[in-house]
Amino acid sequence: MKISSLFDNRPQFSLEIFPPKEHTGGVATIYETLDGLKDIRPAFISCTYGAGGNLADSSTIEICSIIREKYGILPISHLTCVNNTKEDIDIILDRLKAAGISNILALRGDRRPDVPPKHDFEHASDLISYIKSRDPEFSISAACYPEGHPDSDSIVSDVLSLKTKVECGAEHLISQLFFDNEDFYRFRERCEIAGINVPIEAGIMPVTSKQSIMRMVSMCGASIPSRLAKILNRFENNPAALEEACIVYATDQIIDLISNDVDGIHLYTMNKPYLAKRIFSVIDTMR
Ligand code: FAD
């Protein structure tokens, strides 16, 4: 099933997980995460690829196969291109096809200073065009940035680049995390003006510690509004209170987004099912 066809009914609720690191037990531990997430009945679960500067995760495809075969949930396999050649991408596409995975979140990814550059793909749009020309049966999603991508000169040029991704074949967009819904609403308006008319899911991340969220926003360029900054400062040395406050903050963001006709909510679960379950216990009746 194509992800984009899900959005005939809105809003949709989806989840992101990442391949567990070897030192935390590797792929075997993903069952625990998925056991915890399955009752949420997500529209799909996406699995990251090479995130955080790691090189290719062969486990991404394995995990997407588990999501599909063992849990009967639709998977989206993330795929980055900046550290891959066309030959590398061909091998991955063949593996995805053989595993029956037809939905891909096509991304540029980030260059690593310790890895010699590969120049077959400069932008996600190059990867999207390549996949579509090789096998139009793949359904492609892409990333978008309510506050603009950190590399872009302006929010306008970023939205124009986003339009290129859609013209190349992206049928569905998932946003970077954001903490002020007004940023998302302004971005959605700009997309509409630019003629981007594919479903846009809002990426929501429940904060679990001040340190980890500060590291995350320094990498992705998202801003921390003063309401959240005050929560982080007040409870930084009380992890239980911080987590409770931030679950409420994320839930509040989601309720407001649903009330403003969002196409979908994509929850960054960080492989912590209990966080997702707490949030969904409140919003379940709003589907
Ligand atoms: P692009 O779309 O290529 O955009 C990058 C920059 O180039 C932007 O400034 C854009 O405006 C500009 N640009 C884009 N197209 C053009 C063009 N044709 N001409 C000129 N300029 C252009 N990273 C991982 O490593 N693994 C993951 O699994 C992963 N999952 C993610 C999931 C989501 C939902 C999001 C939002 C991000 C994810 N990332 C992941 C991070 C992502 O790889 C980085 O944000 C990366 O820096 C940009 O990727 P992109 O696909 O948005 O790139």
Image (cartoon, rainbow, N blue to C red):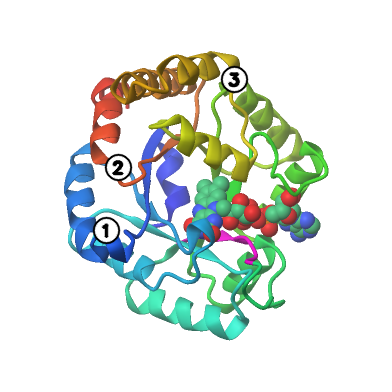
Of the numbered discs in the image, which one, if any, rests on residue 42? Answer: 2
Labelled pair 1, 3 in contact (Cβ < 8 Å): no
Q: Amino acid at mark 1?
A: Thr
Label 1 vs label 3: CA separation? 33 Å
Q: Is residue 108 magenta?
A: yes
Mark 3 / mark 2, whichever is N-terminal: 2
Q: Quadrant of residue 58?
A: bottom left
Check the image and name the residue furthest to the bottom: 87
Between marks 1 and 2, how big is the CA–CA gap? 25 Å
Image point (28%, 23%), residue name: 240
Mark 3 lies on residue: 225
Q: Amino acid at mark 3?
A: Pro
Q: Residue furthest front?
A: 237
Q: Earlier in the sequence, mark 1 or mark 3?
A: 1
Name the residue beneath numbered marker 1.
24
Q: Give percent across and percent down for residue 245.
A: 37, 17
